Structure formats: C-alpha cells, structure tokens
Image: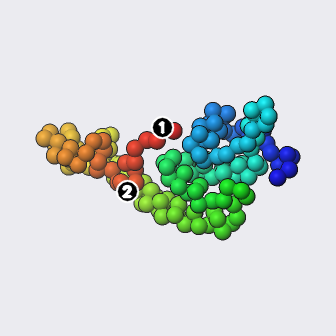
Amino acid sequence: MRSTDLLTLGEVVHRSGFTPSALRFYEREGLLTASRTSGGQRRYARHVLRRLAFIRAARNIGLSLEEVREALRRLPDERTPTRADWTAISRDWRIRLDEQIEALERLRDGLDSCIGCGCLSLQHCHMSNPDDRVAVFGPGAVALPAALRRGPDHS
C-alpha cells in the first residue's frame, strides 16, 4: 500500500462526517483499523470510508453495534468490499427492514386508538387495565411490535 493511500484522522473526519471520538470508538470496538506513524498519529486506509458509510447506514436502520460488528466480520479487511460482498450483507438487512416496515405500518394503523402509552389499544392500556395484566410480559411497551421494541444502543 502506498503512503498516498492512507488518510489522516482529519481527512477521514472531513470525508466521512464522523467525529474523531467516533472513529476512535469504532477502532477500539474493532470495527475499523488504523496504522500509526512513527509519531503515533493514526492513518486509515482509503477503504475505511466505505466501512464508515456502512456503519452509518446500519446504525440509521437500527442495527445494534453487535449486529454491525457481525456484518463487518463478513467483509474483507484488506480491500474495498465488492458489490458481491455488499449484496450478501444487504440480503440480511432486507429481512430486518421488511420486519421494521411491517411493524411501523401496524403502529401507524393503530395510532388513532392509542393514547400514548405504546400499547396501541385501549383494551390493553394500563389506564383501562388497572391490574396491569400485560406487566407479566416484561417492562416497557410490550404490546408494540417486536421490531419496534429493541432497546436503545448507547454506543
């Protein structure tokens, strides 16, 4: 690899839109790799920009950090991923997105009967159900479709 193929932290920040702290975090988590100069400065291979675009897309559709990590394990570290590489991963994303779309459509269609608690039904609502029979199914808005109940990922 030629030294001109390497990008500085600042160049990657500028080109990717990620903050320096995000790049360092993703490096610590094993999602990115960087080499170091003799002075300890990070240098990133150009193909890291595609990995970062992948990470952004994955996070925007709600994939957890672990799901992103698993998907990136399937990509080559030493080269820019090919169309075939992306196609294999996007097949899995398609299933996930279809589930989310279906769940969002159910949410949209049930909103007119919802009073804001997330259960989507006045028949199951805590206010209409003082004994809170739904509580046995766990915390939060358990009546929401599963694809919309994923916990937040604070990475």
Q: Position of residue 136 (x, y in %)?
A: 19, 46
138 left or right of 74?
left
Q: Which residue is mark 2?
A: 106
Q: Residue at x 66, y 51 (%)?
A: 51
143 left or right of 136?
right
> Between marks 2 and 1, how big is the CA–CA gap?
26 Å
Badge number at residue 47: none
Q: Residues within 10 Å of mark 2 (few under 14, many from 20)?
A: some
Q: In this picture, is 21 found above or below 89?
A: above
Q: Which residue is mark 1?
A: 154
Whether residue 113 appears in this view of the structure is no
- Give the amino acid at mark 2: Arg
Q: In this picture, is 88 found above or below 147?
A: below
Q: Are marks 2 and 1 in contact (CB under 8 Å)?
A: no
Choose between 7 and 97: the one closer to the eye.
7
Q: Residue at x 40, y 44 (%)?
A: 151
Choose between 55 and 120: the one closer to the eye.
55
- Give the amino acid at mark 1: His
Q: Position of residue 35 (x, y in %)?
A: 73, 42
